[in-house]
Amino acid sequence: MNAAFFDTNIFAYAAESDGPEPEKRDIARALLQSRAIVVSTQVMLELYGVMLKKLNYAADTAYRWISSLEDETVIMLSPTDVLEGIMISRRYEISHFDGLILRAAERADLDLVYTEDLNHGQTYGSVRVCNPFIEDFLA
């Protein structure tokens, strides 16, 4: 099974039961079933916030979703990672949160990040970004 780093938005689409874009939900769910999942502590925290605020999940239900990620490969971020993420964000003129996602993927020795937030197909250092709603590079 191919491993990839998953950004928050992929999980958010998978968690939407009756959202306006069911095709994205289905793609996200299929990806999560067919790939070895790698996330960071940042993704876990961001997803909890999205589930509460945007998806209107009850806190206990959102917590159960987040706790299920504990069984996946989770990259714990250090102060050095935060600084490296900031440097990545400055180098590529992206948000510091996206820089930290790329840093976490590097730390996991992965060359692929699934996200909708960065440029599809662009390589940032050793990491290539794939928007699976456009094209899945591993399909």
Image (cartoon, rainbow, N blue to C red):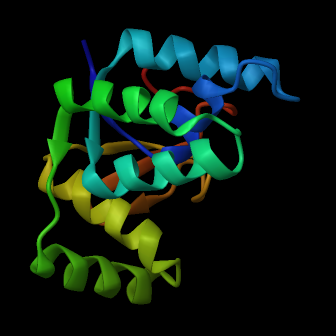
Task: Give the residue at x 52% y 78%.
Answer: 94
Looking at the image, residue 48 sits to the left or right of residue 66; the answer is right
- The reply, left or right, for residue 19 in relation to residue 65 is right
**Residue displayed at 47% across by 47% down:** 48
Q: Quadrant of the N terminus?
A: top left
Q: Quadrant of residue 96?
A: bottom left
Residue 122 locus on image (x, y percent): 50, 57
Give residue 67's position: percent from left, percent from top.
29, 31
Give the residue displayed 58% in from the left and 23% down from the top.
28
Residue visible at 20% across and 56% down?
106
Residue 26 versus residue 109 in the image, above or below = above
Asked where in the image residue 97 lies, by quadrant, the reply is bottom left
User: How many marks can you see?
Assistant: 0
Can you say whether 87 is above or below 81 in the image? below
94 in relation to 43, above or below: below
* Residue 46 in the image, given as x and y percentages of width and height: 47, 55
